[in-house]
Amino acid sequence: MDGVEAATAAGERLETRTDRRTLIGGMIGMFVDSFDIYLPAFVLPAALSYFIPPTLPTSVQATLGTLIFTVTLLGRPLGSLFMGHLGDKYGRRYVALVAGGGFSLFTLLVALLPGYASWGYVSVALMILIRLLAGMCLAGGYAGPVPLAIERASKQQRGLVAGLVAMPAGLALLVLTLINVLISSTLPHAAFVAWGWRLPFFLGVLMGVGYLAYFARVPELQAAVEARQRGERREPLKEFFRRGQGRTLFSVFLLTSGFWLASQPVLSFTPTLLITVLHQPPKLVSQFEFWINVPGLLLIVLYPMLSQKIGRRRLLMAMGTWFVVLSGPAYYLMIHLAQTHAPGPWIWVVGWIAFALTANPFGVLLLYLAERFPIHLRASGVAIPYQFGLLLPSLYSFWLLFLSHLVPYVYAVLVLIGLGGVGLLAAALISPETRDWPMFREEEIPATASQ
């Protein structure tokens, strides 16, 4: 039995210490990544006056607030080119350590930033620059820990493992919301704006240190090592964009772009929309964010498991459809109820429906990308399409301003949800099914993989 066959046999069950450690490493990587990237979206809306003058128009305040988050997403596509190349050329574990050191440092710098009263607009400019660099480092999580964990799973367990790896993203949002609730409940608003907002960023730094300590002990997948040894002169990034790969790249970029165009505004813009535009109490919005994410943890795991039963392509097609016919109407109803001062529970119920249908199924996307590419291109295949798929959706604050000339600003997000659903459905229709594709032997990947 050669090394690849041995690795495949070892991956039939997650029973070895190495398999479990890799799975836990993927979960830790996803948690730390999501915690760090969504920090500004959850923490800063209630502390924007620290970085920008409150005399600015409401729409400009909302745009600057989301821009701090958006630039992190913009940094990730740039970082994915570099991190994906490193992951395929030098190993998943190596890129996990490089990425962890980078985003820990930049999170610390954010926590130490002075505000508008001290440095004027230079303060928010530095925040934007630092978050851009942090985003470049955060792309490493999808080139290292995520593919490494999915690669170790047997064909029958990929749905479960992908769901477990994706689930900590929801857990991170839950923890962020809980931290927000605790800080806003125990600190006066003036204290939160002055220094309380820094506490979650310092916690993010500690998490980054723990992430580095853990991955220092996670071994590289032997099959990936042997794949690199067989192609020592390969240049993964050049091969990833080689001639003849156009249809595959187009379909995966359309897939990820469609998904994130619909889900990113729902996931990231909702706190700003409810607090800044619809004037809902920040404390109640934080509680809302907490309670909608509790059942979301289970759904994040169940969606990839469902794809194990019915197929990745079929579920992706269903997702594109329900984004249009269910998610958009649910989000519209949430906005309408908030505008008419309806009881909080009604707002939270329809808001949860929009979140459950739109933001929770992303584990299916990670699993599909990992299966779509051979092992020597898998780090790039997960990181680059996933992160570049975020490129246009991450500019949602500007799309919302543009669309506000056509529809009321509060309803502009519905257009993005609809367009995202159409793009996701179109991509799924031209994509192959990957549920039964092997993860290791490149020669066994069906011909449709490169069509």
Image: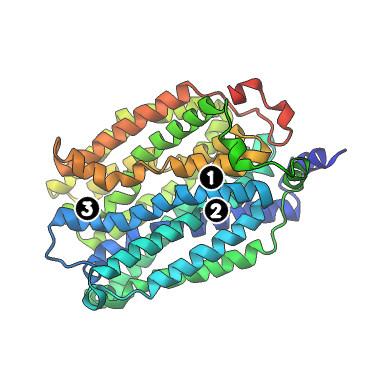
Q: Residue at x 48, y 46 (%)?
A: 298
Look at the numbered disc 1 and give the secondary structure of its residue.
helix
| Real-space CA distance between mark 2 and mark 1, rounded to the nearest whole angstrom | 8 Å
In terms of depth relative to the viewer, which is nearer, 221 or 158? Answer: 221
**Tag 2 near tag 1, CB within 8 Å:** yes
Residue plotted at (28% across, 42% down): 350
Tell me the residue that label 1 is attached to.
383
Viewer-nearest residue: 409 or 339: 409
Q: Which mark is residue 274?
A: 3
Kindly identify which residue carries mark 2: 140
- Image quadrant where residue 256 sits: top left
State the mark number for residue 254.
Answer: none
User: Percent from the top left, x then y, of residue 397?
Assistant: 26, 48
Q: Residue at x 63, y 68 (%)?
A: 213
Q: Earlier in the sequence, mark 3 or mark 2?
A: 2
Q: Let me know if residue 177 appears in the view.
A: yes
Secondary structure at badge 2 equals helix
Q: Amino acid at mark 1?
A: Ala
Residue 433: image x %, image y %?
A: 57, 25
